[in-house]
Image: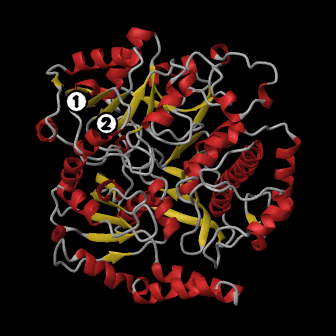
């Protein structure tokens, strides 16, 4: 019987990626940024395609089809109609964007065929599901549900910015759409921009900054009122209309009309890397609260029109773990599942799923565990011999553990002693979160860890919070939740008995005085509002990581560690042993664990700058 093997591709906007499905099973998936080392890489994902083909063992010429994650001609239609509607505004943007479309993207099929020739000569079917159908497919088909409401929310695809669908068996039916320029994702990104962070990557920073806002202050309330009366018309079903006098993203090269924003809010746009005031924090909180209200209303509408007890989600806004948790707390659905690669990278997966289940008509696969995502551990992996070759090139000093149990006992003790550990194991994660295979780990009890990780390891803003990876079986001991969360897509409040009281006048403290107040017995993972973005780890999902956390519990009594992504500011998560070693040497990490090898920083020889550059090029 002939196998159906599908290559899924997302490219040419941001977060390019490639995926291989074989008879509906995810064999491999990776983002192009992990190979080019350009964060949010938008180019054709030739390295990711080469990897997934090699990992699957499938020759390009033997593929059944290729699926691209959106319809370029529909996107061009939206651009042309939008420029026409806003003319003569946007002429400069039009003159920059449209020639590129005419030269390249209008002939996307030819462009893709030219790029794909490097892999083989077969004339394969090339399929183009719509952008939000790709998101919907990525959410529904790997989920554990036979039937579900599907909610996709992002910036924009072709025309749609939000969709509500129903998934049943191997079909997806689109029920409602919200169209450009009215977009929850672009609204949130506009505030990301106005608060001095980079669009398409700084939204996490805005979400992390929001809890420092004063929820009871008159300023926060006024920001909410002004946004909802002047900028955004929010309807009861979750749909919105944006007052485009305040937004430039439809036809210009910037996100916001800064003059009108300043006049309305009484606050100038924050320059990147400049100081953060209480007004900035209150504005971040206001837009986060409004986003949560919109998302919850959309979820209610999805439940009303589908009657389903299960919800699945994708699209960039589905990475807002605080908003996701508001849906869960509202009790609208019995079960919620969110695609861990919810952004455009996951569109490659959704395009492949849409091809397999809708184009080929194949039945949905029932998962034999949490879902069919294989816990998102779908990227490249490296053997001990491959790791050793890298270490030998650098003449690195290391200890090799034949018994991995001895390694986890030793490293868990190092973490308990205050050491920071780079942790490089198995297959790289697909999606934006480090889930225990390309991670930096530390002791959540240590009050100095958040500052040290942000400033000396990650080289980023000091207010950024860190997540705990907690033993799934111990979740209820620390948090007000007992629902597994293997992908860090929900937050939960720390149990009240583990919290420490706030000092008098705490709400009036400046950002960093509040930040460094010890809020609990696990301060490194307790955000300013006593919440944490949780990853649950089970023995079946990641036995090596589970073993390390279990050993840490034996030593400390706490079944959790701090887990942050293995990268430094401005670069993607590390993929290879070479990248892991260079980051280890460039930061203040104390130990590096790669496979069964353990390296102590103090024992390493300095790397000459010229040698490092040459080895990186190699």
Based on the displayed image, in which of its 4 quarters is residue 56 positioned? bottom left
Horizontal arrangement in the rendering, residue 506 relative to residue 358 (left or right): right
Horizontal arrangement in the rendering, residue 316 relative to residue 443 (left or right): right
> In the image, what residue occupies the spot 19% across and 50% down?
615
Based on the displayed image, in which of its 4 quarters is residue 116 positioned? bottom left
Query: What percent of the width, then of the height, locates residue 447?
Result: 55, 20
Determine whether 128 is above or below 547 in the image.
Answer: below
Based on the displayed image, in which of its 4 quarters is residue 245 positioned? bottom right
Asked whether the viewer can see residue 382, the reply is yes
Residue denoted by label 2: 584
- Specify the label residue 604 is tagged with: 1
Instruction: Tell me if mark 2 has few (under 14), some (14-19) or many (20+) residues whose alpha carbon lies within 10 angstroms of its own.
Output: many
Query: What percent of the width, then of the height, locates residue 499?
Result: 66, 17
Is the N terminus in the top left, top right, bottom left or bottom right quadrant?
Answer: bottom left
- Specify the label residue 69 is tagged with: none
Is the C terminus in the top left, top right, bottom left or bottom right quadrant?
Answer: bottom left
Horizontal arrangement in the rendering, residue 552 relative to residue 287 (left or right): left
User: How many marks do you count on the picture?
Assistant: 2
Tell whether label 1 touches label 2 (CB within 8 Å): no
Determine whether 395 is above or below 234 in the image.
Answer: above
Q: Nearer the viewer, residue 481 or 40?
A: 40
- Tell me how far mark 2 sits from mark 1, CA to CA: 10 Å
Instruction: Report helix, strand or loop for mark 1.
Output: loop
Query: What percent of the width, then of the height, locates residue 366?
Result: 38, 46
Asked whether the viewer can see residue 232, the reply is no
Determine whether 97 is above or below 139 in the image.
Answer: below
Q: Nearer the viewer, residue 315 or 462?
A: 462
Coloring scheme used: secondary structure
Instruction: Tell me if mark 1 has few (under 14), some (14-19) or many (20+) residues whose alpha carbon lies within 10 angstroms of its own.
Output: some
- Which is in the foreground here, disc 2 or disc 1? 1
């Amino acid at each position: 019987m002939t196998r159906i093997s599908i290559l899924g591709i997302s490219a040419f906007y941001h977060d390019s990626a490639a995926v291989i499905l074989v008879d509906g099973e995810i064999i491999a998936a990776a983002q192009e940024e992990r190979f080019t080392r350009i964060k949010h890489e938008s180019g054709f994902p030739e390295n990711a395609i080469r990897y997934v083909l090699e990992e699957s063992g499938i020759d390009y010429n033997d593929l059944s089809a290729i699926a691209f994650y959106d319809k370029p001609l529909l996107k061009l239609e939206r651009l042309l109609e939008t420029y026409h509607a806003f003319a003569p505004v946007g002429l400069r943007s039009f003159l920059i964007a449209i020639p590129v479309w005419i030269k390249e993207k209008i002939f996307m099929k030819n462009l893709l065929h030219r790029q794909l020739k490097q892999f083989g000569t077969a004339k394969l079917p090339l399929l183009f599901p719509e952008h939000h159908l790709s998101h919907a497919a990525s959410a529904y088909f790997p989920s554990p549900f036979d039937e579900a409401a599907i909610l996709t929310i992002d910036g924009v695809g072709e025309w749609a910015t939000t969709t509500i669908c129903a998934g049943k068996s191997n079909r997806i039916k689109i029920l409602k759409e919200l169209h450009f320029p009215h977009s929850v994702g672009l609204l949130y990104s506009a505030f990301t921009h106005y608060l001095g962070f980079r669009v398409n990557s700084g939204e996490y920073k805005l979400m992390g900054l929001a809890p420092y806002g004063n929820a009871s202050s008159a300023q926060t309330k006024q920001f909410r009122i002004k946004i909802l009366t002047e900028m955004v018309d929010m309807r009861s079903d979750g749909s919105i209309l944006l007052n485009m006098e305040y937004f430039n993203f439809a036809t210009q090269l910037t996100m916001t009309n800064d003059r009108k924003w300043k006049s309305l809010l009484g606050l100038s746009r924050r320059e990147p890397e400049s100081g953060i005031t209480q007004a900035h924090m209150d504005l971040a909180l206001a837009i986060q609260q409004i986003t949560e209200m919109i998302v919850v209303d959309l979820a209610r509408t999805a439940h009303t029109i589908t009657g389903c007890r299960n919800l699945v989600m994708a699209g960039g806004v589905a990475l807002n773990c605080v908003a996701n948790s508001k849906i869960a707390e509202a009790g609208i659905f019995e079960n919620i599942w969110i695609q861990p690669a919810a952004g455009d990278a996951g569109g490659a997966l959704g395009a492949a799923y849409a091809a397999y289940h809708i184009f080929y008509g194949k039945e949905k696969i029932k998962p034999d565990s949490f879902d069919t995502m294989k816990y998102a551990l779908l990227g490249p992996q490296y053997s001990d011999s491959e790791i050793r070759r890298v270490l030998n090139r650098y003449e690195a000093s290391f200890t090799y553990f034949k018994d991995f149990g001895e390694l986890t006992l030793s490293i868990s003790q190092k973490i308990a002693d205050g050491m920071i550990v780079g942790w490089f194991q198995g297959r790289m994660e697909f999606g934006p979160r480090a889930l225990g295979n390309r991670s930096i780990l530390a002791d959540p009890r240590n009050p100095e860890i958040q500052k040290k990780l942000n400033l000396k390891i990650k080289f980023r803003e000091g207010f950024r919070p860190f997540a705990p990876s907690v033993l799934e079986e111990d979740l209820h001991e620390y948090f007000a939740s007992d629902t597994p969360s293997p992908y860090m897509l929900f937050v939960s409040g720390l149990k009240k008995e583990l919290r420490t009281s706030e000092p008098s006048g705490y709400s009036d403290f400046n950002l960093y005085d509040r930040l460094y107040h010890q809020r609990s017995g696990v301060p490194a993972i307790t955000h300013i509002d006593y919440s944490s973005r949780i990853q649950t780890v089970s023995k079946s999902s990641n036995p090596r990581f589970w073993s390390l956390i279990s050993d840490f519990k034996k030593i400390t009594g706490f079944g959790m560690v701090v887990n942050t992504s293995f990268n430094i500011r401005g670069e993607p998560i590390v993929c290879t042993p070479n990248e892991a070693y260079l980051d280890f040497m460039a930061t203040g990490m104390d130990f590096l664990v790669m496979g069964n090898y353990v390296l102590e920083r103090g024992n390493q020889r300095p790397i000459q700058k010229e040698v490092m550059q040459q080895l990186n090029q190699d």
